[in-house]
Structures are given as C-alpha cells and as structure tokens.
Amino acid sequence: MSELIKSIRERYLRALDRIASSAKKAGRTPEAVKLVVVTKAQPVEVVQAVIDAGAVLLGENYAEEGVTKIQSLQYGSAVEWHMIGHVQSRKAALVAANFNFMHSLDSLKLAKRLDRFCAEAGNVLPVLLEFNVGGEESKGGWEASDETSWQSLPEEVAQILALPNLQVRGVMSMPPLGESAESSRPYFQKAYRLQQFLKGQFPQADFSELSMGTSSDYQVAVEEGATFVRVGTEIVGSRSYQ
C-alpha cells in the first residue's frame, strides 16, 4: 500500500469513527450516516488512492471535471459518484448520463432539463433538493431562511416530484461559513425542521435523506440529523496537488 493510500485510509477511518461517535451521542446508529469523500480539484491519481483506501461514495462539484474522472477510472457499480455542486443548465446532460446521485438540485428549470436528459439516457437519477437556510445571496437553492415562507415551497416541489426520471430522496443545505463548527448548528437544525416540514407536506414521497456538513462541521451535522456528510479536506488534504 502506497504512503498516499495509507494516509488517506487513516484519515478516512478516523472520519468514520468521528461520525459514529457523533451519531451515538445523538442516539442514532452510525449506519444511518453516509460519508461522501469530496474529491473536487484533485487529480485522478489522488482519486484512485481514495478509492483504494476504501471510499465508495465520491463527491464532485463540477460536471466536466467529474465526468473526466468517472471515465478515466471506470469502476462501474463499485463506486457511486455524487454531484454536490451547482450545476449549470447547459451541463445537465453530463450529470444525467454520468452521475449516480445529485445533492444540489436547486431549481425547477434544472429539474426539468435533468428529467429530459435522464429520459434520453435511460436513467432515473436520485436527487436531493437544495435549500438556502442561511439567506446568503452567494448560495444556491430555494430560499428557505424565513420559516414563515415555507408554505410557498410545496408548489414547485410537487412539480419536481411528478417528474418521472428524477427520484427525490430528501434535502441538502449548506450553512454560512462560521468561525466554529458550533456556529453551524442552528442552520443544521433549521434544515432538519425543513426536511420534517416537507415530509409532512408529501407523506407519500421520500424525504429520508439530509445532506449537510463538511470537514469543518460534519460532527455537529450528524448530531442534528444528517444522513450524508460531505468531507474533503480532512480526508484528502488541501487541493494543492499538481
């Protein structure tokens, strides 16, 4: 085992241990939380090492970069590729044809394009709906910072649920960047409440997944109900590989 694989594996296992500890602290089972290793801006050889270290869920932020890696590595069903970043409408076809899961569906327009391209590719794409619970203009997603406005959300959500080639699985959110992990907690709590609100609005739909938490705050996210955490730097290091 190379030194790179060994070091990534050690950090990967440490992250899993921290997830398990946080889950138990919150009275949850560790198995309820899935770790997505974020490999954006990493070269193919580092992504190869991440896979060799045991990771099976890989997260990419940019469609073209992700597709290049997917096609280079050719792991078939052994690895799931998750799109976790904003997707421009013109990149929808790439995501529909190549990714196994999407965390960042942020508009009805994009949903309709993805549905059309999924139909052409013969795929059904599991997706999470991205909501902006922090009110930041720089963040994508449906505006959801004001809980009194949530009653306006189900109209578009219902239209997405009706698309035959997308499979809504839950909610994704990203809090404002804070000075500590603890500063993310109220936003994680709000995202959890939003997930529960949508479950109540659409009891026949599947809103079981909640994607939130990154290297800086994923343990708090697990305590507040995350079922997916997206961890990059803590496992693969900074994105300075050449």
Image (cartoon, rainbow, N blue to C red):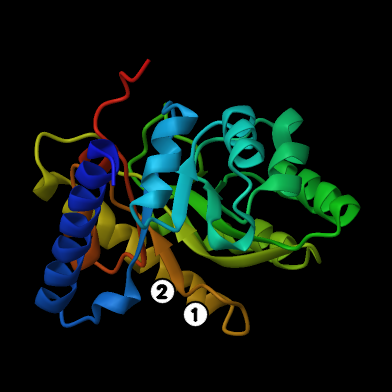
Residue named by callout 2: 196
Quarter of the image with the C terminus in it: top left
Residue name at image x 19 percent, y 73 percent: 23
Separation of residues labelled 2 and 1 (CA atoms): 6 Å
* Spot occupied by residue 30 in the image (x, y as percentages of width and height): 25, 76
Any part of residue 112 in sight: yes
| Three-letter code for the amino acid on which mark 1 is drawn | Gly
Q: Which mark is residue 131?
A: none
* Res. 202 image quadrant: bottom right
* Spot occupied by residue 91 in the image (x, y as percentages of width and height): 71, 32
Residue named by callout 1: 200
Whether residues under marks 2 and 1 lie with C-beta atoms below 8 angstroms apart, the answer is: yes
| Three-letter code for the amino acid on which mark 2 is drawn | Gln
Residue name at image x 74 percent, y 42 percent: 109
Residue sticking out furthest to the right: 120
Any part of residue 176 in sight: no
Q: Is residue 26 left or right of residue 46?
A: left
| Category of crowding for the residue at label 2, using alpha-carbon neighbours closer than 10 angstroms: few (below 14), some (14–19), many (at least 20) | some
Q: Which residue is nearer to you in this view: 184 or 91? A: 91
Badge 1 marks a residue whose secondary structure is: helix
* Spot occupied by residue 69 in the image (x, y as percentages of width and height): 58, 35
Residue name at image x 15 percent, y 65 percent: 17
Q: Which residue is nearer to you in this view: 113 or 83? A: 83
Q: Is residue 85 above or below residue 219?
A: above
* Res. 87 image quadrant: top right
Q: Is residue 175 left or right of residue 64?
A: left
* Spot occupied by residue 223 in the image (x, y as percentages of width and height): 18, 67
Residue name at image x 25 percent, y 51 percent: 9
Q: Is residue 120 above or below residue 203?
A: above
Badge 2 marks a residue whose secondary structure is: helix
Q: Is residue 23 left or right of residue 127?
A: left
Q: Is residue 220 left or right of residue 131?
A: left
